[in-house]
Image (cartoon, rainbow, N blue to C red):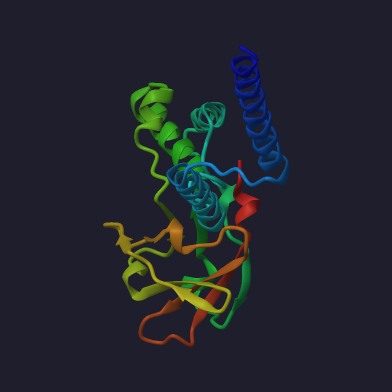
Amino acid sequence: MKVKILFVLLTISLAINAVIFYGLSKYDLVEKGSTQLPKTSMAADSLKLTENKVDIEAKVKSGYGYIYSLTDDQIMKAINEGEKDSAYFGEDFKLPLLSSTSNDSTFDYMDIFINTPYRFVAIYSSNQYAKYDRTSSLEEVSSIINYDHISFSAYLMSGWAKMLAIELKQDGEIIESYKTENNEDGDIKSVYFAVNDIDFREPASLKIFEKSNPEKYSEYKISFEDYVR
């Protein structure tokens, strides 16, 4: 009988020690930071953080959906500003002249504008109200705003647009355009650039020159933040 009692007590003692040892071991691992998440979970979290970082860096670098993106309030402000002026032109978006090597009247009477989404909305609103006596809606305008590109337009003397070229330069590098347009009257030339090719945090310059004589040109300064509305 005593042997049975001793055996039972020994079994209980061993069980208690095992529980205590397991608890202390787990506590020790946690304290030392030795416990680990499953590898699949860690990999997923790491990938998610990397993707977020790349996405944020891309937006900061390119300005896409950033420097010229418009809230609903900003869109309505642009609509109202355009509607108040039946001949809205957006003088605030004109680029300042840096230098010129030509006294030609083509360059003397030339104005260069940056076509931000805000300027586009205001001009569109002005035209709609002047021609059709209608106020543009938020939904209508939002559907036609394009944030993939930014363009610059040169307003020239009649017939000269095709004779000139436009070159965008930033940090010593020429940024290639992906589209150039000349209007039917030949007095407006527009050049389009992908926003992902531009760092909107840094200044740039726009050079307008004669195709047949590149030495004759005018150069304009671009400080992108100056045209945020």
Front-lying residue, 42 or 136: 42
Quadrant location of the C terminus in the rendered image: top right
Front-lying residue, 49 or 92: 49
Residue at image point 43% right, 64% down: 156
Q: Examine the image and state in which quarter residue 199 appears.
A: bottom right
**At which x and y percent is residue 121?**
45, 37
Residue 37, placed above or below residue 153: above
Front-lying residue, 159 or 122: 122
Residue 169, placed above or below residue 37: below
Q: Is residue 107 left or right of residue 5?
A: left
**At which x and y percent is residue 89?**
50, 45
**At which x and y percent is residue 58?**
50, 55
**At which x and y percent is residue 137?**
41, 22
Residue at image point 66% right, 42% down: 29
Q: Is residue 84 left or right of residue 145?
A: right
Front-lying residue, 171 or 104: 171
